Image (spheres, rainbow, N blue to C red):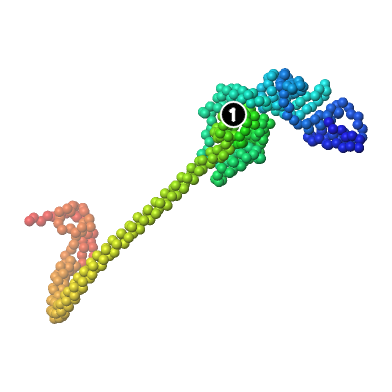
Amino acid sequence: MIIRKPGGSRKRPVVNNRAEQEILALTDQTEKTFSISVFLDLVNTGLRTFDAKVRGEVTSVVERGGHYYFNLKDKEDGSTLNCLIWGRNYRVCGVQLAEGMEIVAHGFPSVYKPNGRLSFQADSLELQGDGALLKQFEELKARLAGEGLFAPERKKPIPLFPEKIGLITSRQGEAIHDFSTNLGRFGFKISFIDSRVEGVQAVPLLLSAIRRFKKADIDVLVLVRGGGSLESLLSFNNEALVREIAAFPKPVVSGIGHEQDVSLVDLVADRSTSTPTGAAKLLSYGWEQARARVDLAERQIRSSFREDLHRAGTLTRELGLAVRDDFRRLLDGFKRHESRLKEELAKQRGWLASAGEIVKRSSASLRGAFPRLLSAGRDRLAAMEKALSLSDPSRQLKLGYVLAHAGGKLVRSVEGIFQGEKITLQLQDGDILSEVINIDKHGK
């Protein structure tokens, strides 16, 4: 805690919330006497600015109320520090506290008001020493492998033509530059979340970014960072992060470290590459192959078109020659037929001239014979008229003859006539309706 001295000044600590603002406002008052509670609040407000990492050996571990209380001892002079970490942060950091292990705790000091004891409130823990880190790495790797989290059959296929990419990495690192430079220009839509990727403190940020992408419209999620030591890759060997990736609904691609770096995130990812550049090339592979096939198809089409054009030109020339020869044959034939036609026309003109003479002579003969034929025709018509007059039924009626009709038919014989039948007698000047009273047949 920093308290302003008479005639002096003090540096105001960073204020995080309204309660701290109210407490700090008290220090501006002229009265410098505080209650114990207010004083300890002032102290804790100032202590929060002492964000630090402390290294020591774990001498005791107690779980109480879902939180973990432990002591750290300095190996050099035996100094001790009471520490605590909330259960949520403890589960995220992935370190299983045990007596005798050496760790680095990140947090800030605070005074517990009920008993006035100073404690170090940690928000993350890291194992100290490559041996301990490697041992923890191998134990966690074996346990997760036993659960099948690294099994090939649970991995999701990477889309051949991804379009929407979710990217998680640090904005300040080289990884984002390597990834974007090698991704290729295929119209990718990249949603980027900036996150710390160094050390165990990055785990909460990485978890938050992955959970945000769970609700996003993406085809694939990508996590990349540069290489580093086992200690610097702690966040990517974190159990909570591995399980979050295993449960992610879309395919996950990792590009973490260099060739020799293999993290647990690499093992659980649906596809891992050795570098951020490798991740970019993996996502571009399908598009690159498609572009290569399109380029090949274009070359084949151009080549085929040139060949077809050449064949068409050759065929056109051949057809032109054939048409020319056929036209010449047709022209020769036309000339032959024209000559024959002229000969036939000359013959027809001669025939027509002869026919004209014949018609002239025939016309003269017809003009001489026509009066004789006309007189003969008139005599024949007169004879026929006389014959028809003699055969006219009305002439017979005028002479006293009668025509009998029965049933609309002319009666020619007594056969078919019966007694009592009605008959019509046609006379010259009218008809008589009669009834047959008696039929007298004449013998022959």
In x, y percent, where is residue 281? 54, 40
Quadrant where the C terminus lies?
Answer: bottom left
Q: Is residue 184 above or below residue 239?
A: below
Name the element at disc 1.
helix
Residue at mark 1: 264
x 37%, y 53%: residue = 307
Which residue sits at x=59%, y=30%? 263
Quadrant of the drawing holding the N terminus: top right
Place of residue 346 in the rendered image (x, y in percent of width and height, measured from the top left):
19, 75
Left or right of 277? Residue 41 is right
In this view of the protein, which residue sits in the foreground, 59 or 379? 59
At horizontal 88% and vertical 27% (from top left) the residue drawn is 35
The image quadrant that residue 273 belongs to is: top right
Relative horizontal placement of residue 201, taking residue 350 as reference (left or right): right
Asked where in the image residue 349 lies, by quadrant, the reply is bottom left
Q: Position of residue 333 (x, y in %)?
A: 23, 66
Q: How many marks?
A: 1
Residue 11, quarter of picture: top right
Foreground residue, 426 or 73?
73
Give how far across and how far down residue 177 sits, in percent. 61, 42
Looking at the image, can residue 138 be seen? yes
Which residue is outermost to the front? 76
Q: Is residue 373 left or right of residue 140?
A: left
Q: Is residue 292 left or right of residue 225?
A: left
> Which sits in the foreground, 19 or 405?
19
Q: Give the residue at x 21% y 73%.
A: 342
Q: Residues within 10 Å of mark 1 (few under 14, many from 20)?
A: many
Q: Is residue 72 visible to us here?
A: no
Q: Amino acid at mark 1?
A: Leu
Q: Nearer the viewer, residue 56 or 337?
A: 56
